[in-house]
C-alpha cells in the first residue's frame, strides 16, 4: 500500500459535452444528462474533493449530473454519524436481525427493503458496451497496488457496561423491548409490582434517609462538573452500587453500537460476521471469495432488477464493482485499514449474504453499491447495511478524527423510491451551485416546489472553489506534464479550449492543478 508521500498523481481523460442516458428513476429514454471522465488512477484526496463538488464514480467512470438539465436532479447527500440516532424504524430492523440470529425467527411483516443505490448508477447503466470500450481505449496506465499488508476485519466493540449492571432497575417498557428483540431472558431482571399486602414493591426505589439523598445529589453534581471521570473523593470502588441512578442515565437511549452488538445467547441459531476486504485481486481474501461474491451479484441483479444474464456477467461485475481508480494508501493518522475501495462482506453461517461496496476517503465513508441474497430480503439488508456503515464510520473516526461523514450517494427528491435516504439524520445536501452543505430540513420546502434548486439561501454566495486560473491546470500530453498555459500555445483545434475550460469549471481549481488531464 502506497504512503501519502509516494503517491502518483491522478490521471483522468475528460469527455467533452454532455451524455444523455435513459433515466433509471423516471424511465425517460434520454432524460438523464451528465458530464463524465475516465479515471486511469485517482488519489483518495482528489476523489474526496470531487464528490464534494457533486461527482460520483461507477467503476473507473466518474460522472457529474448536469443538475439544471437532467430529468431527475441528483443531490449529493451525506449523513453526520457522530450525531446520528437511529429512528424507530431503524431500531425495528436491528431488532429483527437480532431475533433472527438468536432464535431463527423470521419476521412476517413487510419485507420491503431500501438498498443504498441499488441501480448501477443510472447515469452509465444505459450502455455497458460503451463503458467496456472506454476501459479498453483508456487503458493507458498500469496501476500497481501494493496491497500485501493484512487488513483487520471490522471488529466493532459496543458498550457492555449497561448489560453488566444487574442492580439497575428496568422499566416494564424497556423489558418488553428487550424480550421482543430476542435477547436471552436471563439477561433481563424483571421486577413486577406485588399484590397488596404481599410485600414491598420492588419496582420502586427503597426509602432512604434525607442525609443519604443529599450526599447522592452532591455526588451527581460533582459528576456533572467532571463528566470525563469520577470526581475526587467519590471513587466507584468505595461506593455501594446506587439503586436510584440519575434520571438522565436511565432515560438515555441506546447507542447505535449497543443496538447492533446486542448480546446473543450461547446457543444462538445463526452467526453473522462482517469482513472488510480490500478491492484487489492481489488480496488473498478478496480473491478467494470472488466466485461466491460474483454469484451473489448475479442472483441479486436478476431477481431484484430483472436484469438479463448477458447484462450481469463477470465482465460487468468486475468493471463496475471490482475495478476502482482509487489508489490504496496509508497515513500515520489514518484508519488501520487504510484508504481506498473495499467490499464489506456479510457472512451468515459461513456464506456471503450481502456485500456493501464502499470507498474509505479522508473525510468520509462513501457508499458505492449494495447487493444481497434475495432469499434474505426479510432482514431488510439495505437498511441494516447502511446502519452498519454508519457505525463503521464512527469506529474509523476514533482513529482518524477528520473522517466523520457517511456519504449515501445521491438524494433524488423527485423520485419517491429514493427519498428514503433523507431518513438518516442529521444529514445535509450539497448545493449544486456553490458546493456548500445545507441541512436537509432547510432544503425540503424548496424541493417540494421545484426539482432543481439552488440550496444555498445566500444570494451573494458563489463557488469559492471555482477555477479562476485555468492556465495553471495540469495537462498530460505525449508523456510530458505541462501547465495548460503552455499546452494551448501548440493547439490549433478551436474546440479544445472549450473542452478544457468546461472540465476546469467542473472539477474546480484545486483538482485541476493536482490531477493530470490526459490529452492525445
Image (spheres, rainbow, N blue to C red):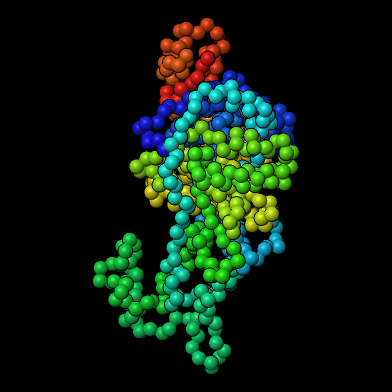
In the shown orientation, is residue 160 left or right of residue 117?
left
* Residue 416, visible in the rendered structure: no
- The quarter of the rendered structure image containing the N terminus is top left
Residue positioned 58% across, 19% down in the render: 16
User: Percent position (x, y) of residue 60?
Assistant: 55, 31
User: Percent position (x, y) of residue 204?
Assistant: 48, 81
In the image, is residue 404 above or below residue 235?
Answer: above
Tell me how many marks there are: 0
User: Percent position (x, y) of residue 339?
Assistant: 44, 40
In the shown orientation, is residue 359 left or right of residue 312?
left
* Front-lying residue, 94 or 516: 516
User: Percent position (x, y) of residue 400?
Assistant: 39, 46
* Front-lying residue, 332 or 427: 332
Residue positioned 43% across, 41% down in the render: 148
In the image, is residue 179 above or below residue 388?
Answer: below
* Residue 253, visible in the rendered structure: yes
* Front-lying residue, 269 or 115: 269
Q: Residue furthest bottom?
A: 197
State which quadrant residue 330 falls in: top left
Residue positioned 62% across, 52% down in the render: 353
Residue positioned 49% across, 42% down in the render: 283
Amino acid at each position: 500500500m502506497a504512503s501519502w508521500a509516494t503517491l502518483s498523481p491522478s490521471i483522468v481523460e475528460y469527455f467533452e459535452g454532455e451524455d444523455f442516458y435513459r433515466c433509471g428513476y423516471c424511465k425517460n429514454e434520454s432524460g438523464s444528462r451528465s458530464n463524465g471522465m475516465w479515471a486511469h488512477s485517482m488519489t483518495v484526496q482528489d476523489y474526496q474533493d470531487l464528490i464534494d463538488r457533486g461527482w460520483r464514480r461507477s467503476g473507473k467512470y466518474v460522472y457529474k449530473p448536469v443538475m439544471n438539465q437532467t430529468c431527475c436532479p441528483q443531490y449529493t447527500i451525506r449523513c453526520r454519524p457522530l450525531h446520528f440516532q437511529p429512528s424507530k424504524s431503524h431500531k425495528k430492523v436491528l431488532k429483527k436481525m437480532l431475533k433472527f440470529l438468536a432464535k431463527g425467527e423470521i419476521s412476517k411483516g413487510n419485507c420491503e427493503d431500501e438498498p443504498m443505490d441499488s441501480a448501477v448508477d443510472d447515469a452509465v447503466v444505459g450502455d455497458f458496451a460503451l463503458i467496456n470500450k472506454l476501459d479498453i481505449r483508456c487503458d493507458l496506465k498500469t496501476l500497481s497496488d501494493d496491497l500485501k499488508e493484512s487488513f483487520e476485519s471490522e471488529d466493532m466493540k459496543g458498550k457492555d457496561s449497561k448489560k453488566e449492571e444487574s442492580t439497575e432497575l428496568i422499566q416494564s417498557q424497556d423489558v418488553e423491548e428487550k424480550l421482543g428483540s430476542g435477547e436471552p431472558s436471563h439477561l433481563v431482571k424483571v421486577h413486577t409490582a406485588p399484590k397488596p399486602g404481599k410485600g414491598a414493591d420492588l419496582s420502586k426505589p427503597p426509602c432512604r434517609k434525607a442525609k443519604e439523598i443529599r450526599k447522592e445529589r452532591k455526588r451527581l453534581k460533582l459528576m456533572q462538573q467532571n463528566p470525563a471521570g469520577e470526581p475526587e473523593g467519590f471513587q466507584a470502588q468505595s461506593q455501594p452500587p446506587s439503586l436510584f441512578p440519575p434520571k438522565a442515565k436511565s432515560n438515555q437511549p441506546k447507542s447505535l453500537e449497543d443496538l447492533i452488538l446486542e448480546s446473543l445467547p450461547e446457543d444462538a441459531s445463526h452467526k453473522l460476521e462482517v469482513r472488510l476486504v480490500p478491492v484487489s485481486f492481489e488480496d488473498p481474501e478478496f480473491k478467494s471469495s470472488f466466485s461466491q461474491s460474483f454469484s451473489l451479484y448475479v442472483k441479486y441483479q436478476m431477481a431484484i432488477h430483472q436484469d438479463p444474464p448477458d447484462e450481469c456477467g463477470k465482465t460487468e461485475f468486475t468493471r463496475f464493482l471490482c475495478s476502482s481508480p482509487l489508489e490504496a494508501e496509508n497515513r500515520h493518522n489514518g484508519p488501520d485499514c487504510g484508504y481506498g475501495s473495499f467490499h464489506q462482506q456479510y457472512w451468515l453461517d459461513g456464506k456471503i449474504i450481502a456485500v456493501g461496496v464502499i470507498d474509505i476517503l479522508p473525510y468520509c465513508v462513501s457508499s458505492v453499491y449494495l447487493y444481497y441474497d434475495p432469499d434474505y430480503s426479510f432482514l431488510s439488508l439495505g437498511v441494516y447495511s447502511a446502519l452498519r456503515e454508519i457505525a463503521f464510520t464512527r469506529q474509523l473516526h476514533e482513529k482518524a478524527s477528520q473522517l466523520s461523514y457517511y456519504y449515501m450517494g445521491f438524494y433524488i427528491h423527485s423520485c419517491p423510491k429514493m427519498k428514503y435516504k433523507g431518513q438518516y439524520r442529521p444529514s445535509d445536501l450539497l448545493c449544486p451551485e456553490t458546493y456548500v452543505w445545507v441541512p436537509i430540513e432547510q432544503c425540503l420546502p424548496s424541493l417540494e416546489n421545484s426539482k432543481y434548486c439552488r440550496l444555498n439561501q445566500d444570494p451573494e454566495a458563489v463557488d469559492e472553489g471555482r477555477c479562476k486560473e485555468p492556465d495553471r491546470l495540469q495537462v498530460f500530453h505525449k508523456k510530458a506534464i505541462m501547465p495548460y498555459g503552455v499546452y494551448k500555445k501548440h493547439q490549433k483545434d478551436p474546440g479544445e479550449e472549450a473542452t478544457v475550460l468546461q472540465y476546469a469549471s467542473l472539477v474546480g481549481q484545486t483538482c485541476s492543478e493536482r490531477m493530470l488531464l490526459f490529452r492525445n
